[in-house]
Amino acid sequence: MTSSPRRSGTKGVARADREQQILEVAGRVFGERGFAATSVADVAHEAGISKPLIYNYFGSKEGLFERCLREASDLLIGEIERTAALGVVGLARAVATLDGVFRVLDGRTWAWRVATDPTAPLADGPGELMGAYRRRLEELAREGVGELLALSGDDDALDLDAMTTVWGTVFGSLVTWWCDHPGMAPDEMSARCERLFGAVFGLAPDA
């Protein structure tokens, strides 16, 4: 359940700061309830502001969600791109990617839930943004999986397609599972992933 209203709409706060405060509250509410079950009134109540202020800043519920989704997708894609640039390959890249995501989501798990909300609108701005986020996520997954298969000499295109789908499911399931277990530190979950990969593949991730 959501907590008591937070005073985001106080006088004397710069518009940009107030917008960010509202987005943080809105992100948590959308993350807890999903887009379909959330109203502008819900967000206004939690933020301690009026509905007209939200409409003035964001135009609509869809506009507010789109801004939250942009925050979430930028956060996640930015971190995955950062770990991709580290130069690690194979299972080590998989663990590094997950570890980075756990750390940027620590205290902001709403971002993952917003980015994966099954009730998100599929049209207009939110739909286009969700589509772009998923395409970029798949591109990065395909790149990492391609490196992993190349280590074993596998250059089959269908193998790459299949394994990219598998990795996407594994990645999403592990992050969702962690989000569903509040209180588990990122480094604890990263160590868990290393153990699981070791059990499944029969070797340490850095091998």
Image: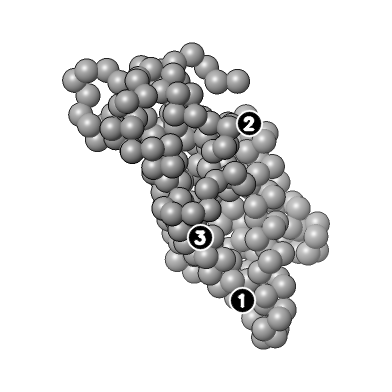
Left or right? Give the position of 154 relative to 12: right
Callout 1 secondary element? helix
First in sequence: mark 1 vs mark 3: 3
Q: Is residue 7 above or below residue 142?
A: above
Amino acid type of the residue tagged 3 in the rendering: Gly
Q: Residues within 10 Å of mark 1 (few under 14, many from 20)?
A: many
Instruction: Report the residue at 27% width, 17% height from top.
Output: 10
Left or right? Give the position of 140 relative to 59: right
Give x and y (percent) for residue 158.
Answer: 71, 81
Nearer mark to the viewer, of 1 and 3: 3
Q: Which residue is mark 2?
A: 182
Amino acid type of the residue tagged 2 in the rendering: Pro
Q: Are marks 2 and 1 in contact (CB under 8 Å)?
A: no
Callout 2 secondary element? loop
Asked where in the image residue 142 lies, by quadrant, the reply is bottom right
Q: Which residue is mark 3?
A: 131
Q: Which residue is mark 1?
A: 146
Q: Rounded to the nearest whole Å, what is the CA distance between mark 2 and mark 3?
A: 28 Å
Q: Rounded to the nearest whole Å, what is the CA distance between mark 1 and mark 3?
A: 22 Å
Give x and y (percent) for residue 51.
Answer: 37, 24
Amino acid type of the residue tagged 1 in the rendering: Gly
Q: Residues within 10 Å of mark 2 (few under 14, many from 20)?
A: few
Q: Name the outermost residue toward the top.
A: 4
Q: Quadrant of the N terminus?
A: top right
First in sequence: mark 2 vs mark 1: 1
Q: Is residue 183 above or below residue 96?
A: above
Asked where in the image residue 25 lies, by quadrant, the reply is top left
